[in-house]
Image (cartoon, rainbow, N blue to C red):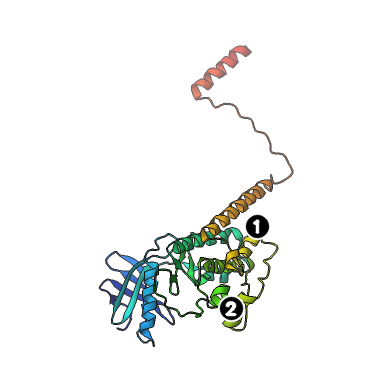
Amino acid sequence: MKLVEGRLIHGRYRLDSRLAQGGMGEVWKGWDIQLNRPVAIKALRSDLTNAEAKLRRLRAEAHNSANLAHPNIAALFEYYEHDGIGFLIMEYVPSKSLADLFHEQQGGMEPLKLLPILIQTARGLFVAHSHGVIHRDVKPANIMVSDNNDVKITDFGVSYSTDQEQITQDGMVVGTAQYISPEQAQGQQATPQSDIYSLGVVAYEGLAGHRPFTGATPVDIAAAHVNDFVPPLPDSVDVQLREFVMSMLAKDPLDRPSDALVVSRTLARIERRLLDEQTELNASTTTISGTRLPRRIASAPHLPPVARNVADSQTYQKEQ
């Protein structure tokens, strides 16, 4: 089957425009002709080598996403196979990615703009972890942010579930080098703390304006996550926020926050404090412009015409 604009998939989903194409397959914007709504369609490319193994990966993504109903996770509507091609029908998220927002920034992002994004992402990850699903590829490109700052986590393509058959081989490194946890970089099994580490890298990048580690190759960057100390965040970052993000980036998973719910709640407390401090600062700096005191204006009570005529006649009689 050739994927072209206008083709109807499963007698229901129309392919409208290709959004992306990669190693696993391609993503289309489509239209659900039954429910009259846009959808995102992820399709496995038919010209892939070792297509059966990649099809198992797509099935695993469908399996892992199926029960993750949460406002901060892009929803999976349906999984369908035809002519050896697998199709994931997902919620269409017409938003920029956090990677796009980082690219638009000059330097670090304001904490009060970044924190709501991190908090929502942590909430979505906690729901996934509660269902035994580890994302394994948390990064800005997989965090979609709407104009209203609503967050959707996307792409569970390399996720792992505790109740599924193992697909990746022992010792295989899974994830993106710039955001990978030390244990993943060493080929160990990812845990919820691995996603917390990756979210910590996202937080670091948002606050500092750059990632904690760079290198000539992905292998060099992954090795830095394992061996190198995390450079300190700028002193301009709030000290409590700075220390908590650094705890998320601890080399030992046991030294990181115990779960993503702790992450979301801690960041929410920091956000509330920063908001209170900003409110107090704004109140203390509000002054009356100029040096002259405002002129006091006194006005007589308003009287209707009849009452005013009576009052005038009474005043006239007294004067007489």
- Residue in front for this viewpoint, 300 or 12: 12
The answer to whether residue 108 is above or below residue 9 is above
Q: Which residue lies at the image location 67% right of the left edge and 49% below the top edge?
A: 281
Secondary structure of the residue carrying tag 1 is helix
Looking at the image, residue 304 sits to the left or right of residue 223; the answer is left
Q: Give the residue number, with chain letter if any, for mark 2.
A: 222
Cα distance in 3D space between marks 1 and 2: 27 Å
- The numbered disc on residue 240 is 1
Q: Residues within 10 Å of mark 1 (few under 14, many from 20)?
A: few
Looking at the image, residue 29 sits to the left or right of residue 281; the answer is left
Q: Position of residue 5 (x, y in %)?
A: 33, 78
Q: Position of residue 1 (x, y in %)?
A: 29, 83
**Mark 1–mark 2 CB contact (< 8 Å):** no
**Amino acid carrying mark 2 in the image:** Ala
Looking at the image, residue 154 sits to the left or right of residue 259; the answer is left
Q: Which residue lies at the image location 55% right of the left edge and 18% below the top edge?
A: 311
Q: Position of residue 28 (x, y in %)?
A: 38, 75
Front of the two marks 1 and 2:
2
